[in-house]
Amino acid sequence: MSEAIWVAVIGIVGGAVGSFVAPWANWGVEQRRERLAHRRTLVREWRAGVAEFSRSLSDYLAPPDERAYLEHEWYLSLRPHLRDEPTGWNPDTLGEEIARIEQEWGLA
C-alpha cells in the first residue's frame, strides 16, 4: 500500500475514534459540573435552614420544639453527611459540620 492510503486509513480511524471519545469526555465534564452545582445548592439550603430555624427559636410567642429541626427537609438531606447525630439543637455545631462537608467536597 502506498503512503497516501495509510494516511487516509489512519485519518478515518482517528476521526471515528474521536467522534466516540469527544462526546464521552464532554459527558464526564458535564456530570462533574452538575454534581458541583447540586452540592452548592445543598450547602446553601442547609445554611438557610439552620439560620431560619435559629430565627424561629427566638419567636417568644410560639417557639417550636428544639428537636423539630429533625423533621425539616434541609436536615434530612444533611443527616447522611454528618459524622455524629446531634444530641440537641446547636447551630454552631451544625455550621461546623456544613463547613467540613463543604471543604471535603472542594467547594470552599
Image (spheres, helix red, strand yellow):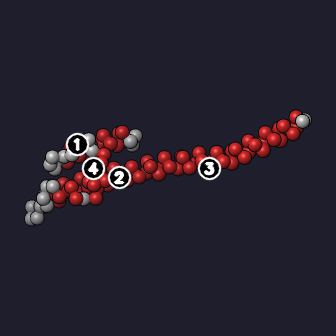
Give the CA separation, mark 3 to mark 4: 36 Å
**Which of the pair 47/3 is nearer the observer?**
3
Answer yes or no: is residue 93 visible: yes
In this view, which residue lies farthest toward the front? 1
Residue depicted at 30% across the width and 40% down the height: 100
Task: Report x, y in % for residue 23.
Answer: 62, 49
Q: Which residue is mark 1?
A: 84
Viewer-side label of 2, 3 = 3
Q: Which residue is mark 3?
A: 23
| Circle nearer the N terminus (1, 3) | 3
Q: How far across and how far down the image is residue 29, in percent?
A: 54, 46
- Residue 42, label in figure: 2
Left or right for 28, reference 108: right
Task: Say which amino acid is labelled 3.
Answer: Pro
For label 2, count other residues whose C-alpha is less than 10 Å away and answer few (under 14), some (14-19) or many (20+): some
Q: CA distance from mark 2 to mark 1?
A: 19 Å
The residue to which callout 4 is attached is: 79
Is residue 83 found left or right of 11 in the rendered image?
A: left
